[in-house]
Image (cartoon, coloured by chain):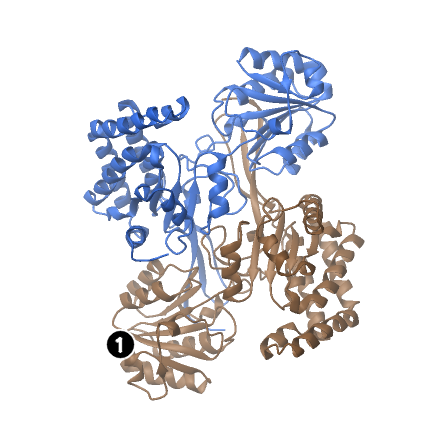
Chain colours: A blue, B brown
């Protein structure tokens, strides 16, 4: 990798600027965030115009309806972006928090404190709102941000990043802390994944395919987010009303997000008692159902499920249904097909609840609650950095603290060993 | 990667066995550790015999003296291994520790608890003691362990792993939790680095080259440990006695380890006052010195330092010496050449101490203490899992807690969104 070309110069600018940001006060960072919020509100027409160019290209290239919707920035959505930036101002600054500390027997004090990573890289697709989101969260946590927002949103992202840079500079910090590499195309994304020493952590946001590609190709440490093949297991002893409301809520409340349930597992004893009611409620909610043989024997409306069904994150009003003989079979099915995001059991049995909590190896394991609660906002973190499905560094909903590292501060009076 | 060959079968056995271990009680794990300690003590002759085969091959292949020493297992060292296993028994079990928890407004309780990673992979070279070390630490933290100890120690590792497996089984847990892949040679190491879904985290231990190779080639998340280009900066206001004792201790107390100092930076005002004394004390301690031009102008004994000198982890009685005009120049030099392991300032000036702590971006930053204190034992963690030089997951000395992930346990009474 040549260090003197335009791409490396851009990464160097972000890195260099991030050093000043790392020691900036919360006050200075909050003023920069307020400056960004105001700049967004003052630039609605310009943002809409740039976004229209992206949308026209999207229509010409037959972009899917859902993607076009995510790509669209209306005046209302743009004001929402500014408001989201102001929400970040209100969050506590994680930098400087003392995580642990002690005084050693020799009189040395040691304090582990939160520090910014340095520069966060983000790779995402056709979602200009993520540009503002990540920039604001990175800024508040003292990190530079290098953004690869994808060619589909290139005009929108270019306008937003320019506006963010200028707003940060106007507030007295170095605007170089936020950079876009969209102009470098796919090659830029690949170089970003290998920019050790310039990028400290890479966060992919988007399809399972995009995330898998980043994980496979990146030498920079990655935080995997997102993909959720989420299970609800209705145990033999489940309360009927509770089972219905949790299953319907987990599946239908917002089917397009990662904490929505994709597979319903039902104990055979509960199936006799509850399955017609559960399937009826799901169908009333507009859910198309797949089932294993036993589930299909109870209803004509279920298509035949395969291993592919069990492994699919539908993100739509579709659900697989399987009857199991035991909680062991439910846990084994989850172990095989889950992306280890969130799983829930509905049960009245204490021992089964505790077994499920102990043995299911997912970021969030629930008893008698909707899987929709796996969310930074619901958990009280305020911000939505994403939901980690990996085991290192962060697991489950991530707050601003998960965008930091730590360092140890050691203060002595001349001690030696 | 074929899933039915001998290599994958071995990984599958470790993975499958690790699931039982994840929920094993501390009592059961401690009994398995005591069983291992006893088995080691009862097998001294067998271990020494296997080790002798490795040593003979080492001598034939002209292995360096230092490597041969690390490879050697004497009766005394073997008893030391058993004793190290018993030290691990005494450590608190990190699994199940509640990291955070709260009750949400809707009545749901959330608890973030420590859980094992699953299976830890380790790649190291010619150090059979690491086989016992990692196996014991993994077992205590509820993790399986797949070990690649290198061909040079193959016979020693084979005997040790067999003994560990049998001892674990004899104590009533599944001995398959510990596996060696030495028989698969280099190909095995490469496959281990790509065994996502089977290995949850990979810990390389050894030379900078080995660690770099693992980081570059691994798709499994890696915890980087070790490499330390460690700096001591003697500020203008440094106390003379303190500067001398810290510099000498940091360099000479145990030069072969990663927290030993490699570069001495001296403020020009302190240089006038202190440099002859510091260099004299280092030379008395047997340290061979390199210097920049200004340092060399004060003494004939310094060889000429280059950028390569500043970037080298000598791990020996050698040190680079540079005169700087300001604390800014010292911090800039560190920023450019450090591996971000440990740096220390010796100063009487409060503002400079705080600036150094704030602006130096290393795992451990010290004021007026020897860099030799960067150590899990010194920090009170008990175990020596290694010293992380990366920013994700763990930074600085790692204890057993750093061998765990977390999961969120959510308990409700039927809540939906």
Protein chain holding label 1: B
Disc 1 crowd rating (10 Å Cα; few below 14, some 14-19, many 20+) is many
Q: Nearer the viewer, residue B273 or A372?
A: A372
| In the depicted structure, whether residue A128 falls above or below residue B368 | above
Question: Residue A106, how many percent across, how many down?
Answer: 49, 68
Identify the residue shown where x is 49% and y is 77%: B316
Identify the residue shown where x is 61% and y is 22%: A320
Q: Is residue A216 visible?
A: yes
Single out the residue that lies furthest toward the bottom.
B300
Q: Nearer the viewer, residue B408 or B181?
A: B181
Q: How many marks?
A: 1
Report the side of B259 relative to A338 (left or right).
left
The residue to which callout 1 is attached is: B268
| In the depicted structure, whether residue A173 falls above or below residue A340 | below
Identify the residue shown where x is 61% and y is 76%: B63
Question: Residue B21, how many percent across, how many down?
Answer: 69, 47
Question: Residue A54, how many percent across, how many down?
Answer: 30, 29
Identify the residue shown where x is 44% and y is 53%: B391
Q: Nearer the viewer, residue B300 or B150?
A: B150
Question: Residue A153, how many percent across, how many down?
Answer: 32, 33
């Amino acid at each position: 990798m040549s260090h003197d070309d335009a791409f490396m110069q851009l990464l160097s600018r972000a890195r260099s600027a991030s050093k000043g940001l790392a020691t900036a006060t919360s006050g200075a960072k909050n003023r920069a965030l307020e400056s960004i919020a105001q700049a967004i509100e003052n630039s609605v027409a310009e943002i809409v115009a740039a976004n229209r160019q992206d949308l026209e290209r999207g229509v010409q290239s037959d972009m899917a309806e859902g993607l076009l919707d995510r790509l669209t920035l209306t005046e209302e959505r743009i004001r929402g972006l500014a408001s989201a930036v102001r929400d970040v101002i209100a969050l506590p600054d994680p930098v400087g928090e003392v995580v642990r500390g002690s005084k050693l027997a020799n009189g040395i004090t040691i304090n582990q404190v939160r520090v910014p990573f340095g520069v966060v890289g983000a790779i995402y697709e056709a979602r200009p709102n993520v540009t503002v989101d990540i920039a604001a969260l990175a800024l508040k946590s003292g990190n530079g941000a290098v953004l690869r927002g994808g060619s589909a949103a290139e005009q929108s992202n270019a306008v937003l990043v320019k506006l963010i840079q200028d707003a940060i500079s106007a507030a007295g910090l170095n605007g170089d802390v936020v950079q876009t590499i969209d102009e470098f195309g796919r090659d830029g994304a690949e170089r970003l994944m290998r920019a050790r020493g310039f990028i400290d952590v890479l966060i992919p946001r988007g399809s399972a395919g995009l995330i898998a590609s980043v994980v496979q190709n990146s030498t920079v440490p990655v935080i995997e987010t997102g993909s959720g093949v989420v299970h609800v297991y209705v145990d033999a002893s489940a309360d009927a009303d509770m089972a219905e409301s949790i299953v319907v809520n987990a599946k239908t409340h917002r089917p397009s997000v990662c904490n929505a349930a994709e597979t319903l597992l039902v104990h055979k004893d509960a199936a006799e008692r509850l399955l017609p009611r559960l399937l009826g409620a799901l169908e009333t909610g507009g859910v198309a159902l797949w089932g294993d043989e036993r589930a299909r024997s109870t209803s004509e409306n279920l298509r035949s499920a395969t291993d592919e069904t069990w492994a699919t994150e539908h993100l739509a009003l579709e659900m697989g249904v399987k009857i199991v003989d035991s909680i062991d079979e439910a846990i084994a099915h989850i172990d095989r097909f889950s992306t280890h995001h969130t799983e829930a059991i509905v049960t009245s049995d204490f021992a089964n609840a505790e077994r499920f909590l102990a043995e299911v190896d997912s970021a969030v394991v629930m008893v008698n609650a909707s899987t929709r609660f796996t969310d930074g906002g619901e958990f009280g973190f305020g911000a939505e950095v994403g939901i980690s499905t990996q085991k290192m560094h962060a697991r489950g909903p991530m707050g601003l603290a998960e965008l930091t590292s730590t360092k140890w501060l050691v203060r002595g009076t001349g001690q030696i060993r």
